[in-house]
């Protein structure tokens, strides 16, 4: 039976491990690991025992297409829905549509062959080779009664004729379209170097299988980039007792997401676990031997590393190429939309028939000053998929905003890191509970005197309290009278790097003279999607 | 005029306190005449279980911190058990024993107890072979967990009459109807000291000849101090045999009141997993956690401000019946989806023994359902134990047509009342 744990919800109670120690493991304080496919009785016991009901399994529920004509929703009847992107977001959106009674045709288009699978384990336990297979297929939550087009990419959309064009020349018509194409790993920028045997990225199951096979040969490893994925890969390398260097161009790993203060703690953690951590450096060249195998890396500080494997963990690229020229506000920054997931056209006006959700969606979050966010989080994909699907088949008055606070987690070096809110949206940080020395603590972030985020290291049970404080716009720093607080709470600058949003790169031409005729056009979106510092 | 909470405490309502809960929930956070705050709605209970401004350490109240039991008593006063402590001490003490009980140190320990628990269950039911009237409590629900906790902890089963008395007194001190908070805590300290002295003797013996039990593991571990080991052992001994007995007894009572569920359980042993969870929601043994909590700061919740220093009472059983969280909450429905009940509490004080209680109850109810032939209640409701917080039948008399042999395959039950 397939199983996936919603680690956004998991608080580390460990009840699944007690109930099914052969399936679930909690090898350190709080990080949970599990096999994606396991004995049915054990899995069902664990699912029942979970205090936060975060263990998701195949459901017997068959909720096929109800009988009857297309359901009228809003102003026009919706009889054909097309979802482009058949991973977590697309799957969850489809399930919501059926759960909410959508009776029409449903087409799922996905360029990856095979069934949808869960990605987060791919940079964690899946790489250690402990589980027999890399099967992280997502549980079947609902029978979708959908037409699946797998292994075929969407190459364009015709908004006027409401049609999605496919790579094989076919076209699929829709009444409502959901864009859920997500992101892909940003490749190593130098194509010759990227082509070397031993220079890899990690995003797909195939990438993970390849990386796992390479790690088994016990290479010397260079991880390029100290974000969450890079840090998790370095952690896996140390777990496998491999020599690993991590090169991060900023002052500390995780600094981009969590700021310098917590980044420094992450740096200490990496060094304590034997990672050769080099901060403030970039990789200037990757060199191969005569057979085209990676053998050497050169760093900006002049140092040279003999390595057989380099993992480029440079973040991601939005899968928006197929939308170029479509007239939608899609670019390297993602696909712009309102809080109800309705996509903007190039004029910045919402369309009622095209929706977006998941990693590729760029949406305004009221809690963060209505700023536009893209969130590559499991929990955001799930939450936004639900809202998008609901709104696709709802009358205007029944539409819902996507207001969930971001929550994400990372397992590295034996520590379960969780966060709620947007730590990068802050000016100060304070250790509110626990001990940095023991690496069990809660860090609370403030933005202009209000709590904006919280990060826990092996203290996930407190996270919801801080989520409530953020939602209440509670003052920062928080109340000092708390259990497990340190002697004195001293807020310090969070050390968030100032970044200009990537959307500054958009080149837009406005044409037409009178109000009626004025239109914006987005020029070729092939500019750098990288954030400008 | 008594408050809904005071009526809930009244023994007259012990057999069926549930009709009082809707009234209790009308005021989610209700100030009582004694100044304590009673919280009865799901959302608010969950929030406070995860609120670091709520302390479980009553020593925050000076009148409790100052309690010193008579020095002429040879039994030294023990530090409070970890469920009555806050982080970081709580976390350290809980981890100290978790190391030998569950993940990460001993992930398979509880699951590994299944064959032995099944064996004890089988033996207890075998002993009933020629009986037609059974007291589910005395004959089964009490001896099962006591035997299990004694073996796990390394406490001689034959000492049961001795520690059972201390345990009963200790449990009684959680009952708000038996005196003021100070009086009850003084009584508790005295009783725990005596239990501690008894366990201290055992600890010495285990140090000399360690077994594979928890007490041996704790005394041979260099890290924990002896007083903390004794507090922890006392907690596990009491909790291990005063709670599961009620879950099993409440469970059998509920199954007999819902014969279709009992019948399905008999035919489908795997169903027990869901039955146990729904019991924890619908008829939990713990209606309120024993340790009282206090506010370390003013806490505003559901429009009420709980002032700093106030005692907070969380009525978990009412939260688990909150219609704002559970559809049709007064219906016993093991197939209920998303059963995120409060039977074991939540947050850092989530029941330490939960995995063991689940395992024991799953096996106990599964075997009772399978082996009792034609079980029916003699009296409904049965007589109840006095305590409102720890709630369960004092006795649960049932009549049976007979006991099936342990290796008897399940056959369709004869329909007695078509």
Image (cartoon, coloured by chain):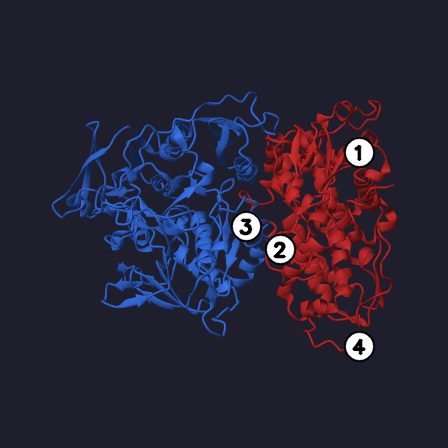
Chain colours: A blue, B red
Which quarter shows the N terminus of chain B? top right
- Binning the other alpha carbons within 10 Å of mark 4 as few (below 14), some (14 to 19) or many (20 upward) gives few
* Badge 4: chain ID: B
Q: Is residue B84 above or below residue A164?
A: above
- Binning the other alpha carbons within 10 Å of mark 1 as few (below 14), some (14 to 19) or many (20 upward) gives many
* Labels 3 and 2 touching (C-beta < 8 A): no
* Labels 2 and 4 touching (C-beta < 8 A): no
* Labels 3 and 4 touching (C-beta < 8 A): no
A150 vs A433, left or right, is left
- Residue B118, position as x, y percentages in the image: 67, 59
Residue furthest front as drawn: A514
- Judging from the image, what secondary structure is the residue with disc 1 in? helix
- Judging from the image, what secondary structure is the residue with disc 4 in? loop
Q: Earlier in the sequence, mark 4 or mark 1?
A: 1
- Judging from the image, what secondary structure is the residue with disc 2 in? loop
- Alpha-carbon distance for marks 1 and 3? 34 Å
Q: Nearer the viewer, residue B261 or A83?
A: A83
- Alpha-carbon distance for marks 4 and 1? 49 Å
Q: Which residue is mark 3?
A: A17
- Alpha-carbon distance for marks 3 and 4? 42 Å
Q: Quadrant of residue B222?
A: top right
Mark 4 or 1: the one toward you: 4
Point 27% across, 39% down: residue:
A530
Q: Which residue is mark 2?
A: B339
Q: Nearer the viewer, residue B153 or A142?
A: A142
Have a look at marks 2 and 1 and say if they share a chain: yes
Q: Which residue is mark 4?
A: B416
One can see residue A132 in this view: no
Q: Is residue A478 above or below residue A7?
A: above
């Amino acid at each position: 039976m397939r199983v996936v744990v919603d680690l956004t919800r998991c608080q580390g109670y460990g009840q699944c491990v007690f109930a099914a120690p052969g399936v679930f493991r909690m090898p350190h304080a709080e990080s949970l690991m599990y096999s994606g496919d396991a004995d049915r009785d054990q899995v069902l016991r664990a699912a029942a025992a979970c205090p936060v009901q975060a263990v998701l399994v195949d459901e017997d529920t068959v909720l096929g297409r109800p009988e009857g004509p297309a359901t009228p929703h809003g102003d026009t009847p919706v009889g054909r829905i097309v979802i482009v992107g058949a991973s977590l977001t697309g799957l969850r959106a489809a399930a919501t549509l059926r759960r909410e009674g959508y009776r029409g045709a449903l087409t799922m288009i996905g360029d990856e062959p095979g069934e949808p699978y869960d990605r987060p384990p791919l940079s964690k336990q899946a790489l250690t080779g402990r589980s027999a297979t890399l099967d992280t297929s997502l549980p079947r939550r609902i029978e979708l009664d959908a037409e699946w087009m797998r292994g075929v990419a969407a190459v364009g959309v015709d908004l006027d004729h409401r049609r999605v064009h496919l790579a094989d020349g076919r076209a699929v018509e829709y009444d409502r379209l959901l864009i859920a194409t997500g992101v892909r790993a940003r490749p190593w920028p130098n194509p010759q170097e990227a082509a070397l045997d031993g220079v890899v990225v990690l995003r797909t199951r195939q990438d993970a299988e390849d990386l796992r096979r390479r790690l088994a040969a016990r290479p010397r490893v260079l991880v390029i980039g100290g974000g969450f994925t890079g840090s998790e890969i370095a952690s896996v390398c140390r777990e496998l007792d491999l020599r690993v260097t991590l090169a991060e161009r900023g002052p500390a790993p995780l600094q981009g997401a969590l700021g310098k203060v917590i980044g420094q703690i992450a740096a200490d953690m990496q060094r304590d676990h034997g990672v050769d951590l080099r901060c403030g450096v970039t990789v200037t060249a990757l060199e191969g031997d005569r057979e085209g195998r990676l053998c050497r890396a050169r760093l900006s500080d002049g140092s040279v590393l003999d390595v057989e494997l380099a993992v480029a963990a440079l973040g991601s690229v939005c899968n928006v190429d197929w939308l170029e020229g479509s007239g939608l506000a899609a670019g390297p920054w993602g696909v712009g939309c309102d809080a109800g997931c309705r996509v903007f056209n190039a004029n910045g006006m919402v369309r009622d028939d095209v929706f977006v959700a998941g990693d590729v969606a760029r949406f305004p979050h009221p809690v963060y000053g209505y700023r536009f966010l893209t969130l590559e989080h499991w929990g955001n994909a799930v939450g936004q998929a639900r809202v998008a699907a609901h709104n696709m088949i709802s009358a205007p008055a029944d539409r819902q905003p996507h207001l969930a606070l971001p929550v994400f987690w990372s397992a590295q070096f034996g520590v379960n890191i969780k966060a709620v809110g947007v730590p990068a949206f802050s000016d100060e940080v304070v250790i509110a509970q626990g001990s940095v020395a023991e690496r069990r603590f809660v860090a609370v972030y403030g933005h202009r005197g209000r709590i904006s985020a919280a990060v826990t290291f092996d203290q996930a049970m407190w996270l919801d309290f801080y989520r409530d404080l953020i939602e209440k716009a509670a003052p920062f720093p928080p109340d000092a009278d708390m259990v497990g607080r340190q002697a004195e709470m001293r807020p310090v600058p969070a050390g968030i790097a100032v970044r200009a949003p990537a959307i500054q790169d958009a080149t837009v031409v406005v044409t037409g003279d009178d109000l009626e005729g004025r239109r914006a056009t987005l020029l070729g979106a092939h500019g750098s999607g990288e954030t400008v510092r | 005029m008594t408050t809904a909470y005071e009526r809930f405490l009244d023994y007259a309502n012990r057999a069926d306190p549930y009709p009082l809960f809707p009234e209790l929930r009308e005021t989610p956070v209700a100030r009582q005449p004694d100044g304590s705050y009673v919280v009865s709605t799901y959302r608010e209970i969950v929030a406070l279980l995860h609120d670091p401004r709520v302390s479980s350490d009553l020593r925050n109240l000076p009148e409790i911190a100052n309690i010193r039991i008579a020095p002429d008593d040879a039994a030294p006063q023990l530090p409070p058990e970890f469920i009555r402590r806050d982080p970081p001490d709580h976390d350290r003490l809980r981890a100290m024993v978790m190391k030998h009980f569950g993940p990460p140190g001993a992930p398979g320990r509880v699951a590994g107890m299944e064959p032995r628990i099944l064996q004890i269950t089988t033996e207890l039911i075998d002993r009933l072979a020629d009986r037609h009237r059974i007291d589910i409590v005395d004959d089964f629900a009490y001896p099962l967990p006591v035997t299990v906790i004694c073996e796990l902890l390394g406490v001689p089963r034959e000492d049961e009459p001795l520690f059972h008395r201390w345990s009963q007194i200790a449990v009684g001190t959680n009952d708000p109807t038996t005196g003021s908070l100070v009086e009850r805590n003084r009584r508790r300290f005295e009783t725990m000291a005596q239990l501690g002295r008894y366990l201290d003797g055992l600890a010495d013996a285990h140090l000399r000849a360690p077994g594979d039990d928890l007490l041996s593991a704790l005394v041979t571990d260099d890290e924990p101090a002896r007083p903390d080991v004794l507090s922890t052992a006392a907690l596990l001994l009491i909790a291990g045999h005063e709670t599961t007995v009620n879950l099993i007894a409440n469970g059998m009572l509920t199954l007999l009141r819902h014969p279709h569920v009992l019948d399905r359980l008999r035919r489908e042993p795997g169903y027990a997993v869901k039955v146990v969870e729904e019991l924890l929601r619908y008829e939990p043994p713990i209606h309120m956690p024993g340790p009282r909590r206090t506010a370390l700061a003013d806490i505003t919740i559901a429009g009420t401000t709980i002032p700093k220093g106030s005692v907070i009472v969380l009525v978990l059983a009412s939260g688990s019946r909150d219609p704002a969280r559970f559809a049709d909450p007064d219906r016993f429905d093991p197939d209920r989806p998303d059963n995120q009940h409060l039977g074991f509490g939540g947050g850092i004080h989530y029941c330490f023994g939960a995995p063991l209680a689940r395992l024991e109850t799953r096996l106990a109810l599964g075997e009772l359902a399978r082996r009792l032939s034609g079980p029916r209640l003699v009296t409904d409701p049965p007589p109840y134990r006095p305590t409102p917080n720890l709630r369960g039948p004092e006795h649960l008399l049932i009549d049976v047509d007979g006991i099936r042999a342990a290796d008897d395959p399940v056959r369709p039950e004869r329909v007695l009342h078509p």
